[in-house]
Amino acid sequence: MIERDEVRRQAFVAHGPEPLQFAREGPLAGLNFAVKDLFDIAGSRSGWGNPDRLREADAAVATAPAVLLPLVAGARLVGKTHTDEIACGMFGMNPHFGTPINPQAPLRVPGGSSSGSASAVAAGLCDFALGTDTGGSIRVPASFCGLYGLRTSFGRISTAGVMPMAPSFDTVGWLARDAMTLRRVGEVYFGTIRSEGRSRFLLARDAFDIPVRRIGESLLPIARALGAATEVALYPNGVEEWLDTFRPLQLNELWSTHGAWATAPGRVLSQAVRERIELSQTPRPADVARAAVHRELLTRRLTLLLGDDGVVLIPTAHDLPPLREAPVSAQVAFREKTLALTCVASLTRLPQVNLPVTRVDGCPVGLSLIAGPRGDEHLLALAEELSGRLAESMIEA
């Protein structure tokens, strides 16, 4: 049995602010929330998961707009949460500050880089938590910890006062244990959310062949049971078409934002992040330019398929969360396979929501919905509509 205090200790950073509340009335009154340690809070430092950054950082002079909105809406901020080092991770493993606990699968990682946020919500230490998502950092921990999690449309929520990682991919998102809370938070950012009528489900059949067999076989019947769906091919030219477009763009932006800082003499970095920074120097300008053009072609293809009412059904991750003691080599292999699924919404700048739909070997497994441009409200309404039916499938597969 995992002690609640131990989960709290490993989920929240020690340098976070004292609990903060701006209003006692409002649409989020009565709810507690946490924020990933990439968001600025006035008077508090942001460590970004790195001890050098924490030591060098000044206290923020202003609070990130994405944090101000729930505060003004009556929610109470209870602290800042751990993250993978400079958000470079999919597992939540941080050799400097430790790995937050996955309350739903304590022997396994919580997922990253919004690891502490997912851990805190899954343990009931707060009602919702803000995180960021560049290549899956909301969606993967939501799947691993059995949560609802939304990656918002690129550009819909301000990233001012939030550490940039790859600026043309970075988005703000949040996690919650139930779809109603997820929607309530969404209304603070987007306004009143109502059901938009019948959704046109598009089952990305080839995407269900990417996960390991037990995951794909567990998710496919659940996806089909959500409603009549048209089967489509998301990867008509193969998975590498998407990955070869994502990699040079994301790596080039990582080098642009953190290369000079990360390669300063004497910089303290974990081995995995140091290798990632070294890799980020390798994309050639011609490869980056080619990928930028192909990104627009992929975006056009998917947005035309989705239209105004389409929703793509896709697995969130390709396998169960790795064990906490998994070696770095296993982490790299896992990341590449799950990235084939998560890079779709990242490249096309579209919103995606993870739904906790089943368990395999005792671990939560998520199914995702991707909507068209600015379809965040559509996804939040649909997630709440489906949540009752999905609760019945949360049994061992």
Image: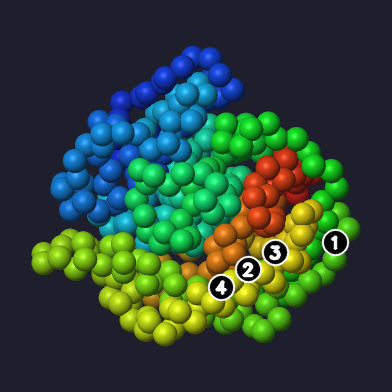
Structural distance between the alpha carbons of marks 3 and 2: 6 Å
Structural distance between the alpha carbons of marks 1 and 2: 21 Å
286 and 237: which is toward the camera: 286
Do labels 1 and 3 touch, CB within 8 Å?
A: no
- Around disc 2, counting alpha carbons within 10 Å, would you say few (fewer than 14), some (14 to 19), or many (20 or more)? some
Mark 3 or 4 closer to N-term? 4
Do labels 3 and 2 touch, CB within 8 Å?
A: yes
Label 3 secondary element: helix
Tag in front: 1 or 3: 3
Label 2 secondary element: helix
Residue beneath label 3, please?
Answer: 303
Question: Which residue is located at x 43 percent, y 47 percent?
Answer: 159
Does residue 365 appear to the left or right of 66 in the view shown?
A: right
Disc 3 marks a residue whose amino acid type is Thr
Farthest residue in the left direction? 265
Residue 64: x and y, percent? Answer: 38, 38
- The answer to which quarter of the image holds residue 363 is bottom right
Q: Note whether 72 is above or below 213 in the view shown.
A: above
Disc 1 marks a residue whose amino acid type is Ala
Do labels 4 and 2 touch, CB within 8 Å?
A: yes
Residue beneath label 2, please?
Answer: 299
Label 4 secondary element: helix
Label 1 secondary element: strand
278 and 216: which is toward the camera: 278
Tag in front: 1 or 2: 2
Does residue 176 appear to the left or right of 262 in the view shown?
A: right
Mark 1 or 3 closer to N-term? 1
Structural distance between the alpha carbons of marks 1 and 3: 17 Å
Residue beneath label 1, please?
Answer: 229
Residue beneath label 4, please?
Answer: 295
Question: Which residue is located at x 38 percent, y 67 percent?
Answer: 253
Tag in front: 1 or 4: 4
